[in-house]
C-alpha cells in the first residue's frame, strides 16, 4: 500500500517524516502490502550513488613496462615466447598504436597525455603537468625504475653503464626526468631510481624502463623476452600483484608504418583471457590509470577511451 492510500484510510498526515514512516509501517502491515523504500518515501534521505568508474576500486598497484621499437607481430612472435604467453593468458590489446616517431614523444605522451611538442630524442625540459603531479595531488605515490640510471637527478642524455656499449641508460626513455617540476626538485626526482632499488610495494604506480639492451633497442627480441621472464615472472607472482595490474607496451613500431605495437594487460584476477580490438593508444593507457585512481584527464587522454574491457571486473 502506498503512503497516499494509507493516508486515505484515515491516517492523518504528519509533518515529521519519522512519524509518517511509523504510520506507514503500522497501516500497511495490516494489509500485507509491500513496504515502500525510504528513498521513495523521502528522497532527501537517500544516499547518493557512488561515482561511476571502470571498476569498484582501484588496484593495489599499477606497473607499466615499456619496451622499444618492435611491431606487434614481431614483439609477440617466435622470438618472444614469454611475452606471447602473457598475451595469451591475460589481456591483449590487438589494435593498439603508438603515437609517433621517434621514441621520446611517445614516453611523454604516456606520462602527460601529450608529446609536449617534442619531435626528437634530444634533451628537453618540459613545464607541463604530468601523471606524477596528479598522483601526488590525490595522495598517491609513484616511481620510475630505469635500469642503470645513476640517480641524484641525473639529467645527462646517457649513462654508459652496460657491457660493450650496450645496456646503457638513456634519458629519452625516462618518462619523468624531462619534467622540470621533477628534475629540479631533489625530493621528487628521488622517485626515479635504478633497478637495484626496485620494490613492487613501494608505490601506487610505477613505470619500469629496461636499459638499451633489455628493452630490445640494441639487442635481439629474444634478449628482451628473456629479461621479461626473469624480471616480470617474480613480479606477477608477488603479493603486490595479487590485486594489481601490469601494462606491457612498446614505445613505437620502428619498421611499421601503422605504428601498431603490442600491449598486454596482466591481471591475476582475470579468470580467463581477454582480447580487445578497440583502437587504443598511449593516451588510452594514461586515461586508464587516471580512471582507476579517479584523477582528472590530461591533454590527449581526455579524448582517449580507457581500456576498461581488458581489466578484471570490480
Image (cartoon, rainbow, N blue to C red):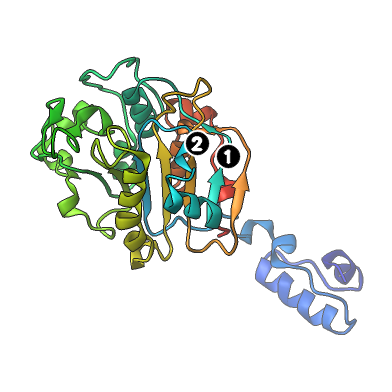
Left or right position of 175 against 69? left
Identified at 32% across, 63% down, the residue is: 234
Identified at 39% across, 31% down, the residue is: 251
Callout 2 secondary element: helix
List the residue tagged with mark 2: 72
List the residue tagged with mark 1: 94
Q: Report the Cα–Cα distance between label 2 and label 1.
A: 8 Å
Circle 1 Cα neighbour tier, 10 Å, few/some/many (<14 / 14–19 / ≥20) = many
Is tag 2's residue or tag 1's residue first in the polypeptide sequence? 2
On the image, the x and y values in percent for residue 212 come to 24, 35
* Image height of 204 relative to 111, above or below: below
Identified at 74% across, 63% down, the residue is: 41
On the image, the x and y values in percent for residue 225 come to 36, 48
Callout 1 secondary element: loop
Count of numbered circles in the view: 2
Left or right position of 42 against 56? right
Circle 2 Cα neighbour tier, 10 Å, few/some/many (<14 / 14–19 / ≥20) = many
Quarter of the image with the N terminus is bottom right
Residue 199 in sight here: yes
Amino acid at each position: 500500500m502506498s503512503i497516499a492510500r494509507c493516508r486515505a484510510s484515515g491516517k492523518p498526515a504528519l509533518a515529521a517524516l519519522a512519524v509518517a514512516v511509523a504510520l506507514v509501517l503500522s497501516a500497511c502491515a495490516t494489509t500485507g502490502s509491500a513496504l515502500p523504500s525510504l528513498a521513495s518515501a523521502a528522497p532527501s534521505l537517500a544516499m547518493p550513488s557512488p561515482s561511476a568508474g571502470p571498476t569498484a576500486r582501484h588496484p593495489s598497484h599499477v606497473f607499466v613496462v615499456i619496451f622499444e621499437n618492435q611491431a606487434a607481430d614481431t614483439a609477440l612472435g617466435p622470438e618472444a615466447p614469454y611475452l606471447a604467453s602473457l598475451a595469451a593468458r591475460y589481456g591483449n590489446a590487438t589494435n593498439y598504436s603508438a603515437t609517433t616517431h621517434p621514441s621520446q614523444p611517445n614516453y611523454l605522451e604516456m606520462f602527460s597525455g601529450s608529446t609536449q611538442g617534442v619531435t626528437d630524442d634530444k634533451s628537453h625540459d618540459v613545464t607541463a603537468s604530468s601523471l606524477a603531479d596528479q598522483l601526488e595531488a590525490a595522495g598517491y605515490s609513484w616511481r620510475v625504475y630505469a635500469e642503470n640510471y645513476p640517480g641524484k637527478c641525473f639529467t645527462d642524455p646517457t649513462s654508459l653503464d652496460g657491457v660493450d656499449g650496450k645496456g646503457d641508460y638513456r634519458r629519452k626513455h625516462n618518462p619523468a626526468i624531462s619534467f622540470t617540476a621533477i628534475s629540479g626538485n631533489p625530493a621528487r626526482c628521488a622517485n626515479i631510481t635504478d633497478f637495484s632499488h626496485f620494490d613492487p610495494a613501494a608505490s601506487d604506480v610505477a613505470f619500469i624502463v629496461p636499459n638499451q639492451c633489455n628493452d630490445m633497442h640494441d639487442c635481439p627480441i629474444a634478449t628482451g623476452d628473456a629479461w621479461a621472464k626473469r624480471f616480470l615472472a617474480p613480479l606477477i607472482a608477488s603479493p603486490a600483484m595479487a590485486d594489481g595490474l601490469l601494462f606491457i607496451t612498446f614505445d613505437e613500431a620502428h619498421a611499421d608504418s601503422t605504428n601498431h605495437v603490442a600491449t598486454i594487460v596482466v591481471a591475476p584476477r582475470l579468470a580467463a583471457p581477454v582480447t580487445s580490438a578497440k583502437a587504443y593508444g598511449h593516451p588510452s593507457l594514461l586515461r586508464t590509470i587516471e580512471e582507476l585512481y579517479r584523477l582528472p584527464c590530461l591533454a590527449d587522454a581526455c579524448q582517449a577511451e580507457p581500456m576498461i574491457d581488458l581489466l578484471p571486473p570490480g
